[in-house]
Image (cartoon, rainbow, N blue to C red):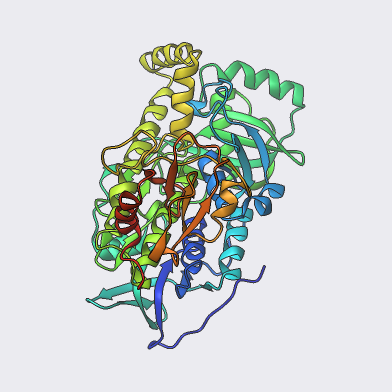
Amino acid sequence: MQPLSFTAEPSAHFDVIIAGCGPTGAMLAAELRLHDVRVLVLEKENDPTSFVRIVGLHIRSLELMAMRGLLDRILPHGRRRPAGGFFAAIPKPAPTNLDSAYAYLLGIPQPVIERLLAEHAIELGAQIRRGCAVTGLQQDDDCVTVELADGAQLRSRYLVGCDGGRSTVRKLLGVGFPGEPAQNETLMGEMSVGMPPEEIAATVTGLRENHHRFWLRPAGGGMYSVLVPAAGVSDRAKPATLDDFKQQLRAIAGTDFGVHSPRWMSRFGDATRLAERYRVGRVLLAGDAAHIHPPIGGQGLNLGVQDAFNLGWKLAAQIRGWAPGTLLDTYQAERRPVAEEVLDNTRAQTELLSTAPGARAVRRLLTTLMDFDEVNRHLIEKITALDIRYDFGPGPDLIGRRLPDIEVRQGHLYGLLHRGRGLLLDRTGRLTVGGWSDRVDHLADPTAALDVPCVLLRPDGHVAWIGDDQQDLDGHLSRWFGAPAD
């Protein structure tokens, strides 16, 4: 795919400029385009990601992709694996009867998922401009002026920083990024090996018992995925080398396994930080620009994509003029606590990877406790974001939670959410969305697989209301979708 290049005069005006065209930025651009928002994505790199790191889409992210009709496009490029063994790499099977039609992990090369999401955004009308680094910003009551490295200036109503853990946008805003710096660093890559497979298996099996930050396992195509602790914490801008891998493999395993011909190599640390604010005026943060944490459990990409789904429809509502007064504020109110939870569970998982006697004892205890289905389920639902319940106030437990892809008369629920609109799923046939029909769809279906009369879904699939009273429904439509049209 050749990304669209868009040249704009300094006086050009957009609704939203997004800094960063990773998965979060591309997904946000697509969500905004569903509502005809004029979007420009600025990416400082000239070319898309080239190294073939495998990332994982967890259950909730797969559900969101299904909601937008993207899953069939993505699945052929990935490899499914069971939804188990994620928490601190403790090898337990997936819990029984996870409440999702997509109860698996999809491993997919990072360049592929980035390309597919960028293509999706472009097809919807987003403009992507590569080789454009944001170097400055100013905002007033009406717009944000973005300055680029070449001196050009662009104006938009809003700016969203999706530009990674070293976010320029966050730094320009002066938003604090408190947390813990990296204490440990890990080397990860894919490469060929010179040792016979049976010798590799025998060596690795003996080491994995006590070295949970180490593996060497087949990655397909004759390559092996290699993970090994680094010698110390270094400047992450310094690229990992094959000699680094050989040195650390010899230190841990007593052999370098004859590694050679790397496909890609990287290093990552266990720094854990959370932005103090997700919004300053007309500038917002999402993805790694708002939170960083160790990759244990594979939650980072998923957390960012889910930020985009939460923010997209709210920011679009603000721009289209129908957002209730505090709707955009709910982005931080809902997503920052989710990030706090993820940071905490990665901190816990990191401790469980330690070789210290105390950590090993806790790991053995937790391994035993995970034989209880309730414990295993709790941890997997936390990793895969199935446990999220936004605080919408008092009400039944389903309020604020996701609704699974239940069967409805027209097939499955998520097929009705492709346009990014709200949905009233009405088993009574007596209700109406009235003046909100330009923002909310209505399906009267007494056969829907629900054990409540009716639900109102937000565009991100979370339940905003349960009941059967029209006046009560109207109040909640106003809360989430603003004033009705005349």
Q: In front: 54, or 287? A: 287
Place residue 342 in its image quadrant: top left
In percent of the image, x 44 and y 19: which residue is there? 375
Question: Is the N terminus in the top left, top right, bottom left or bottom right quadrant?
Answer: bottom right
Instruction: For the C terminus, give its image quadrant.
Output: bottom left
- The relative height of residue 158 versus residue 96 in the rendered view (above or below) is below
Name the image quarter holding residue 485. bottom left
Q: Position of residue 243 (x, y in %)?
A: 58, 41
Q: Is residue 181 visible?
A: no
Q: Where 183 falls versus 36 (above or below)?
A: above
Quadrant in which residue 318 is drawn: bottom left
Q: Residue at x 59, y 29 (%)?
A: 215
The residue that appears at 55% across and 70% down in the rendered structure is 46
Say whether residue 299 is visible. yes
Residue pictured at 33% horizontal, 72% vertical? 321
What x and y, as percent, mark residue 167? Answer: 37, 59
